[in-house]
Image: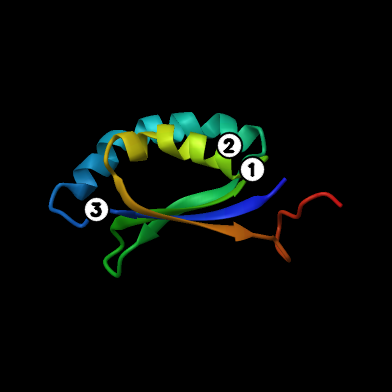
Amino acid sequence: MPQFLLIAHDGDDAEALDRRMAARPSHLEGISPLVEAGHVLVGGAILDDGGRMVGSMVLADFPDRAALDDWVSNDPYVTGDVWRRIEVLPYRTAVGAWMPPG
């Protein structure tokens, strides 16, 4: 399956962190089955210099870009207006704790 690196930037307005914290429980609940199914390999918050969450990164393994886009478009961080700018890049793991089969 193709791998993708998703880099998502939160809004930079005064309410951005409040939106993130409101959507976070639903986001984590929804992403858990994707982790268990092997579609989300690693993910976490991007922090600013003060340690505040300002975005996210996800290393994902989906059958194709359309499947990834379907998940992203329905994620609470998108529907809750947390992620304002999303970059998706094709990716291939070369070293690390998780390596694709074959």
Determine the image quadrant of residue 54. bottom left
Where does residue 73 sit, x and y in percent of width and height?
Answer: 42, 36
Q: Which mark is residue 11?
A: 3
Where does residue 69 sit, x and y in percent of width and height?
Answer: 50, 40
Describe the element under mark 2 as helix, strand or loop: helix
Determine the image quadrant of residue 92. bottom right
Name the residue at the front extreme: 66
Task: Give neighbour class at mark 2: few <14, some 14-19, many 20+ (Cα, 10 Å).
Answer: few
What residue did someone put label 2 on? 67
Does label 1 or label 3 sit earlier along the sequence?
Answer: 3
Task: Give neighbour class at mark 3: few <14, some 14-19, many 20+ (Cα, 10 Å).
Answer: some
Residue at 71% across / 54% down in the picture?
98
Q: CA distance from mark 3 to mark 2?
A: 25 Å
Q: Is residue 73 left or right of residue 65?
A: left
Q: Check contact, mark 3 vs mark 2: CB within 8 A.
A: no
Q: Check contact, mark 2 vs mark 1: CB within 8 A.
A: yes
Out of 49 and 41, give the one closest to the viewer.
41
What residue did someone put label 1 on? 64
Describe the element under mark 1 as helix, strand or loop: loop
Residue at 26% across / 35% down in the picture?
22
